[in-house]
Amino acid sequence: MEEKIVNAIQDEYPDDFAWCYGCGRLNEEGHHFRTGWSGEKTVTIFTPENSHLALPGFVYGGIVASLIDCHGTGSAALALHRKNGHEAGDGMEPPRFVTASLNVNFLKPTPHGVPLQAIGTVQEIHPKKFKVETEVFANDILCARGEVVAVVMPNTFLNK
Amino acid sequence: MEEKIVNAIQDEYPDDFAWCYGCGRLNEEGHHFRTGWSGEKTVTIFTPENSHLALPGFVYGGIVASLIDCHGTGSAALALHRKNGHEAGDGMEPPRFVTASLNVNFLKPTPHGVPLQAIGTVQEIHPKKFKVETEVFANDILCARGEVVAVVMPNTFLNK
């Protein structure tokens, strides 16, 4: 299992797309999720903050859902970037995805105070649409399983 | 449509259950979602913070998912509390639910800078399990639709 993401796709997003509260490097108050490859899987590692509680001792489900969400769009971007012949870190601008749907099954209470590892499997279901199945582990225990359908961001998002 | 929740179920949770990052009144850094009845529907109103962006101008999906999550558990608590003969505000301790599953479909980009209204329909599917269908509106436009299955919190959650 990776302990640190070296080449994260979010490091490569253009500045205009780097404000996401979940994964934007320019959002000072956000979570700064960073997603990279680990073999054929994708990985995001995140240690929740002290305030990210459901109850004392357990992580808030909305944080787990957020992790799965951005891990999904980041994984889709990694996959399409690779399909296009590129890797995070090679200096090429990657595609940017948005979430069409997010499903999370909470399997066990997620313990607070340890790093969470989101491990994803990416599948292309259409040239502009990817499905990412994600498992979230804490202390190597599977705590949640999620699925994101991510689509290439329409150009209209920046033309508001 | 309600503009303010007067009697929120989260105001009635015992202190030990009031630390949720989404809806706990004692979590100083959390979102403080508050959920009440509006006729036979349940309502949570939340205005995202400046940092809660997907892109400039649009709300982060993880915040919408968090809103649907806590709106779901809060709505389930309201419904079971009512079934037990009580209402938020009558001084009786309500039941507390946890999320078993969370599904969100993002229908339109959610505009940032306006209050979001989560409107829920609660259905009992087992004496200890409720399903909450939620629609999230911004400027009266339906932006996301979600479903939460919420179960009565096991006693083990406080016996860690």
Image: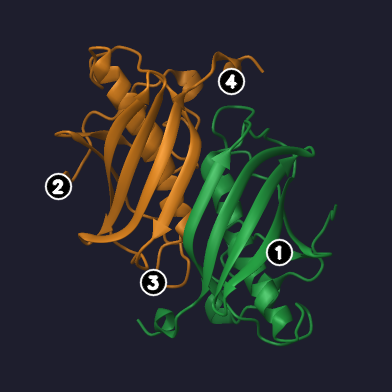
Chain colours: A green, B orange
Q: Is residue B3 left or right of residue A57?
A: left
Marks 2 and 4, how far apart at CA: 35 Å
Query: Where is mark 2, residue-wise?
Result: B1
Q: Residue at x 32, y 63 (%)?
A: B113
**Of the image marks 3 and 2, the number of the one nearer the N terminus:** 2
Residue type indicated by callout 2? Met
Badges 3 and 1: C-beta atoms under 8 Å apart? no
Badges 1 and 2: C-beta atoms under 8 Å apart? no
Q: Camera-side residue: B67 or A153? A: A153
Residue A39 in sight from this viewpoint: yes
Q: Could you confirm whether marks 1 and 2 are on the same chain?
A: no
* Chain hosting mark 4: B
Q: Secondary structure at mark 4?
A: helix
Q: Could you confirm whether marks 4 and 1 are on the same chain?
A: no
Query: Where is mark 3, residue-wise?
Result: B57
Q: Residue at x 35, y 17 (%)?
A: B94
Marks 3 and 4, how far apart at CA: 38 Å
Residue B151 image point, x, y percent: 46, 26
Residue A17 image point, x, y percent: 54, 76
- As drawn, the label of residue A35 is 1
Q: Could you confirm whether marks 3 and 1 are on the same chain?
A: no
Residue B67 image point, x, y percent: 40, 46
Q: Residue at x 45, y 80 (%)?
A: A154
- Disc number lying in front (3 or 2): 2
Q: Is residue B22 left or right of residue B124?
A: right
Quarter holding the C terminus of chain B is: top right
Using the image, determine if residue B131 lies above or below residue B17. Answer: below
Residue type indicated by callout 1? Thr
Q: Determine which quarter of the picture holds residue B37.
A: top left
